[in-house]
Amino acid sequence: MSFKCGIVGLPNVGKSTLFNALTNSNNAQAANFPFCTIDPNIGVVNVPDGRLDNLAKISKSKKIIPTTISFVDIAGLVKGASKGEGLGNKFLSHIREVDAIIHMIRCFDSDDIQNVNPTVDPIRDLEIIETEMMLADLESIQKRLEKNNKKNVDEDQIKILQNAQDLINNDQDISILKDNFSKKQINLSGLLSLKPKIFVCNVDEKSIQDGNNHTKAFINKFGKENTLIVSADIENQINELDNNEKENYMTMIGLKNTGLDMLIQKGYKILELDTFFTSGPEETRAWTIEKNCIAPKAAGEIHTDFEKGFIRAETISYDDFINNDGWVNSKTNGKMRLEGKDYIVKDGDILNIRFNT
């Protein structure tokens, strides 16, 4: 599976610049005027994972195939979008298609880059976006709970929608629904306000290490758990350098990780994802699964026949595979396990699936 993150925010906060940096492309038009992005740009990016190279070296693999993440650059939102202002409903429909939302928030002062609001205020900007998404959710809920449409909604979904409606109408935190309903039920609801979120504070170069007054105010209100401080301009500059230059430049400006690395780490965490591997002479490959995924379902990521005809999974942990120099020694030294249908695949497991067709 590959997951999809939508980059959202007000116009001119740096969404397209970040998208181009993350995807190492110039697919998204980045310009100094509102709504320069109209149709969403989509970029598929390899997920960096140093374990792949280590496994491939031991297995003498001909190919290395990383897992991927998709980024979607969605047009800027303005106040009133839920009522059709700006690109309105078109914007909101694009958000419905993503697994997680990256809120891009302006945390820099500049006379050269237009701001749709008179001042820089990241807290206000986020509240504008989240209010519009809640209003869009409310409209969607009302339509789905109408008598004529109710017959197409199952009982659990009706409960979620009714609870969500009450919470929004009473100005309460809708995210508490995640404590009362399963992840699958929440995902099926399609509510924008319940999608996992990452907050990206876009800063200038001098603020990338310690932030600034804007980032401090934002983190003070929303916390740092899902908040990243990134300079979209710096990320773009880094992508134009070769590996040696990149490393030297990052050291010089005190940047330990790229924005892409940080976003992927946060994305895996909030979406509760793990990675397992297959490794042999032909290829070493990474596969993304949800946490607590059972072995047959993980096998299904490789091929649907593997899930249908699953018998056993030859399993070695990453550390054991490395320490025992591959499959043969791991098996000889008792580090390979035969796991059945109830086995929960762990992050870093190397699997070889036994199945019947």
Image (spheres, rainbow, N blue to C red):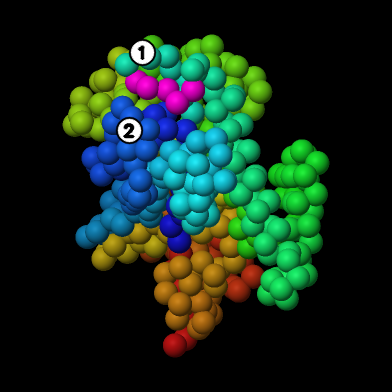
Q: Position of residue 144 (x, y in %)?
A: 68, 64
Between 323 and 240, the one nearer to me in the picture: 240
Magenta stretch in the rendered image: 113-117
Q: Is residue 158 left or right of residue 63?
A: right
Precedes in sequence: disc 2 or disc 1: 2
Q: Position of residue 95 (x, y in %)?
A: 50, 50
In the displayed structure, would residue 44 be above or below residue 235?
below
Which of the image's four quarters has the N terminus? bottom left
Which of the image's four quarters has the C terminus? bottom left
Note whether residue 101 is visible. no
In the displayed structure, would residue 58 be above or below residue 174?
below
Q: Position of residue 163 (x, y in %)?
A: 79, 53
- Give the residue pinned by disc 2: 17
For the image, the number of numbered tags is 2
Give the crowd class for mark 1: few <14, some 14-19, many >=20 residues within 10 Å.
few
Q: Residue at x 47, y 33 (%)?
A: 10
Gap in Å between the C-alphas at discs 2 and 1?
A: 18 Å
- Give the residue pinned by disc 1: 111
In the displayed structure, would residue 116 be above or below residue 109?
below
Q: Residue at x 61, y 49 (%)?
A: 136
Mark 2 lies on a secondary structure that is helix
Residue 152 shown in magenta? no
Residue 114 shown in magenta? yes
Q: Residue at x 80, y 49 (%)?
A: 166
Q: Are marks 2 and 1 in contact (CB under 8 Å)?
A: no
Labelled disc at residue 56: none
What amino acid is labelled 1 in the image? Answer: Asp
Note whether residue 171 is visible. yes
